[in-house]
Amino acid sequence: FIMASSHTVLMRLVASAYSVAQKAGMIVRRVIAEGDLDIVEKTCATDLQTKADRLAQMSICSSLARKFPKLTIIGEEDLPSEEVDQELIEDGQWEDILKQPCPSQYSTIKEEDLVVWVDPLDGTKEYTEVLIGIAYEGKAIAGVINQPYYNYQNDEKQKLREHRNEAKAGPDAVLGRTIWGVLGLGAFGFQLKEVPAGRHIITTTRSHSNKLVTDCVTAMNPDDVLRVGGAGNKIIQLIEGKASAYVFASPGCKKWDTCAPEVILHAVGGKLTDIHGNALQYNKEVKHMNSAGVLATLRNYDYYASRVPESVKNALVP
């Protein structure tokens, strides 16, 4: 048994966030499965989403606050201050993360210097993900993304079986996947791939499109355009070689959407900025909206940044 104090605050927090994100993924699957299977009286999909959202956030925020009481935690959902059901608390820490060295520049960080940005359920339905981003001095430095439905069977019988088994199998059930990263250490839990050289595949919003968004995408001269939900999901497309740039010329996504994914991208040499090329700020006083949009790439950032039309830049004020 290793004394907790032998690990840095940052690595303990990331190890906890990993276990907490997995627990949140289980909660999301359980709530959605109960709705799908009529275990609760018929609720509409958005209500289920809301319930999953709320429970996942309660689980994440309460679990982390209990273990790290001096953290600043900012979540998408406003939470009631009532006592949280013990069943929602995740106390575990992912051992593999505790075995990793903490990058030296972060080894003396104190708990109260860290800000955690939480999106309990980014995107919708099949693209959903749990995002936990960790920032220090305004910069995103560590992040965890859980995809509850990664490699998931979508057929009803299978769902019922998995739902029953999951109740028995506990947290070791291998459903979904969890990706994590720390700047200066790397990003883990996925296979890094790049889009073939010379192909320009743009991923952009599925639900928040407008003329600015489309003008900006068109200016990139893309070979193909993908439209999917979830900011984290779009960043994962970049690191898995499905898209070469994430272009979103509009306000709409928030700090908790970009904090964790940005770290994963930066840890493997990519770049994420607003549409003007400014780094995003994550200190606790910052406004939550990314009002100047997002431009992110794994490689060739300058190619895409140089093609953002002036009209788009003028329309989006940081």
Image (cartoon, rainbow, N blue to C red):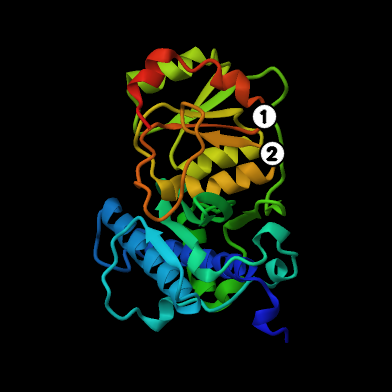
Q: Amino acid at mark 2?
A: Gly
Q: For the C terminus, which image quadrant?
A: top left
Can residue 135 be seen in this snapshot? Answer: yes
- Compare marks 2 and 1 and give the one earlier in the sequence: 2
Residue 91 at what x, y percent from top left? 53, 79
The dot on residue 269 is 2
Dot 1: what SS?
A: loop
- Please tell me how crowded label 1 is: few (under 14), some (14-19), or many (20+) other residues with Cα within 10 Å: some
Characterize the local packing of mark 2: few (<14), some (14-19) or many (20 or more) Cα atoms within 10 angstroms.
some
Closest to the observer, 303 or 52: 303
| Residue depicted at x 54% and y 12% | 221
- Secondary structure, mark 2, is loop
Residue under label 1, please give it: 299
Q: Position of residue 285 (x, y in %)?
A: 37, 53
Which image quarter: residue 16?
bottom right
* Lateral position of residue 80 relative to residue 299, left or right: left
* Image position of 243 (left or right of 185): left
Discs 2, 1 touching: Cβ within 8 Å: yes
Residue at the image position 73 percent from the left and 87 percent from the top: 1
User: Where, by quadrant of the figure, is residue 239 drawn?
Assistant: top right
Q: Vertical placement of 130 versus 307: above or below? A: below
Q: Residue at 73% of width from left, 21% of height from top?
A: 197
What separation in Å lies between label 2 and label 1 (alpha carbons)?
Answer: 8 Å
